[in-house]
Amino acid sequence: MNHVAKKFWRVHVLHRAQWNDHYHVNISQSLHNHGLEVGDQVRIGTNHDNLALFTIQSILEEDHDSTMDKTSCDHHHHRVQLNGKRIGLDQDQKDCELSGPSVVMLKQQPQQQSKKDKEEEEEFCDQSIKEQSEFVEQLNQREEKSGKEFLFLALHGGDMEAFTAQQVELLGNSIPCTTYVCKGYRKGGGAFNRWHITSSELSIRSFPKLNELANHQPKHEYCISFHGMSKGGILIGGLASSMEKELLQSILLQEIEKKNQNDDKVIVRIAESHDLYNGMSVKNPVNWLTESGTGGIQLEQDRTVRSKYWKEIVKSVIVYCSNKKTSTIIMHPVL
Ligand SMILES: [Zn+2]
């Protein structure tokens, strides 16, 4: 698997003001020849203060803009077609910068670190990522030697969907598991707008740690992905069986109830196919990263729920996992 090259190009912008899709881009054959593929994520903008991640939707036909000024210099051969609203590009701006890869890499952490050192280093790294308004992915494996059962994801962590990265990191520090977290920041706000890529479109070519996780053997039996939505309480989605989702639902209701004595009831609902954030795509990492391809549970949590109950939700997931472990032991006495 070749990852998107660490390269930088100046590109000519073909504006698509009428395009309602602000998250995709079409690229010229010349960029495709340099190794960019449909489905890759790339950074496009005028400079580091003004850029966003886009997903390549298609490769432009060679003769697409035959009317273009052919006398223009070399970089004008590289073209992108997009609606530049997200990055504030107006119609008369014709030049942009395009670069890969999508994420910055953190220095590899030595294996033999004490927990405290590691936490300090993580904080330091987070701080520098924040200061640089950057985007990073982190993969941590803290499994028991005997089993590789639980995988937790925060694909839109940092300031994109607040508290989701903290939830997964807390789980990683609490039970043996694998965690994968993406964190995006932007000083002055707008991290979501800049970095958010729909789960089902995240490319393993653009996210090297996700690729590492994809190649991880054996695959995880259970995967829970933490997300944020603006309203609606908690929505439990993913392709896991109704039985699994109902079990987690009842634990969540219990744990939240313990803290929530006088407040309004929190709605904890199981997603249906018509729900927008149902997490049921087979292309969603929560599903394809599991052994069966259908073992994922997606937890969508509204803003209030995340700020008020993020730890109760983590506790619920730990209870859910210990329940899984017990049942595994009962079903397989050899363990
Ligand atoms: Zn999300």
Image: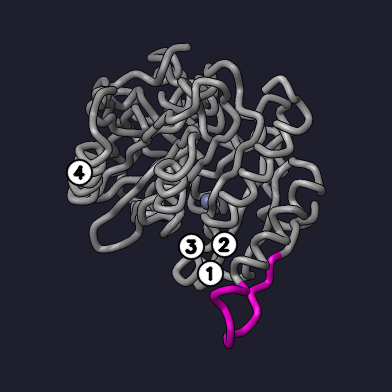
Label number found at residue 305: 1
Q: Is residue 307 above or below residue 195?
A: below
Disc 2 residue type (three-letter): Gln
Label number found at residue 301: 2
Q: Is residue 232 shown in magenta?
A: no
The mark nearer the N terminus, 2 or 3, is 2
SS at circle 2 = strand
Label number found at residue 120: 4
The mark nearer the N terminus, 4 or 3, is 4
The CA span between labels 2 and 3 is 9 Å
Labelled pair 1, 3 in contact (Cβ < 8 Å): yes
Q: Of 42 and 10, which appears nearest the observer?
A: 42
Q: Is residue 30 above or below residue 155?
A: above
The CA span between labels 1 and 2 is 6 Å
Q: Is residue 277 above or below residue 199?
A: below
Disc 1 residue type (three-letter): Val
Q: Of 268 and 272, which appears nearest the observer?
A: 268
